[in-house]
Amino acid sequence: MEMILLPGGVLRAPAWDPTLRETSMRNVTEDLPFYLRTAVRLHDRVTLKDLLLLAEGHREFLLPLFTDLLDEFVDEVQQPAEPDELCELDYLEICWESYSEGRRFDLQPILVGRNHDDEQMYSVEAVPTNAMGHLPVLLRTDFQLRLGKNGDVVFPTDGSVLKRDFLLYDVFDAVLAEITFHGDPTERDRWWREIGSRELDATDPPGEESF
């Protein structure tokens, strides 16, 4: 059994039941801070809104770890969006981005937008959270280590992939880092109005476009 986050932000983890004398799943949502460093699986109907509301429920613990902008984005994700304002992506994905510094390779979790019928990754840093709050968030554990501006694969070189589970901490880290990249919602919208839509440049990860 493994820890799982269910729709509505309910966190369940295996625990020993002394009455049944066996391990069973129990609701540990209220004890979330103790499970941040535990590997987690997301139900395929868990949405961005679920994750933000769950974070808000533990704001006193999470704010020092992540961002003091959380409240503003929680307020935004609960605001209704007009049908023509909804994000047209099929789902959001948390995946591993590899990067290098000297001889050191490292990974960081990132949040991107995806569609079922193409392999393109889309940046969602400028998308209002209420426009994509309804989208399911999926986890992609496989990755390859890449190096340089062209994103050349350095390992494994035989076309296979590596895998790494996500901790609950990684999930919050990816979501909050992406949506707060340009500051609060007002600063984000002002940044987007100033640049319009942008072209990919050499600093963008390979295969990722702005949505």
Image: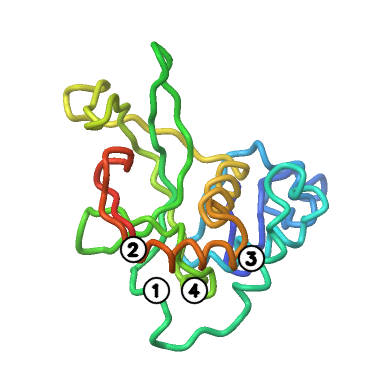
Please tell me how crowded label 3 is: few (under 14), some (14-19), or many (20+) other residues with Cα within 10 Å. Answer: many
The kind of residue on which mark 1 rests is Cys
* Residue at (77% x, 44% y) in the render: 64
> Are discs 1 and 2 less than 8 Å apart at CB?
yes
As measured in the structure, the alpha-carbon distance from the residue carrying label 2 to the one carrying label 3 is 19 Å
Among numbered discs 4 and 1, the one appearing first in the sequence: 1
Give the residue drawn at x 59%, y 72%.
77
* Mark 2 / mark 3, whichever is N-terminal: 3
| Identity of the residue drawn at 83% across and 52% down | 60
Disc 4 versus disc 1: nearer the observer: 1
CA distance for labels 3 and 4: 14 Å
User: Which residue is identified by label 2?
Assistant: 211
Callout 2 amino acid? Phe
Q: Quadrant of residue 203?
A: top left
What distance separates the C-alpha of mark 4 from that of mark 1? Answer: 9 Å
Mark 3 lies on residue: 73
- Residue 38, picture quadrant: top right
Q: Which mark is residue 87?
A: 1
Residue 34 image position (x, y, % from top left): 76, 41
Any part of residue 1 in sight: no
Whether residue 203 is visible to the viewer of this picture, yes or no, is yes
Which amino acid is tagged 3? Phe
Category of crowding for the residue at label 1, using alpha-carbon neighbours closer than 10 angstroms: few (below 14), some (14–19), many (at least 20): many
Instruction: Describe the element under mark 4 as helix, strand or loop.
Output: loop
Q: Where is residue 132? Give x, y as percent.
A: 47, 70
The crowding category of the residue bearing disc 2, from other C-alpha atoms within 10 Å (few below 14, some 14 to 19, many at least 20), is: some
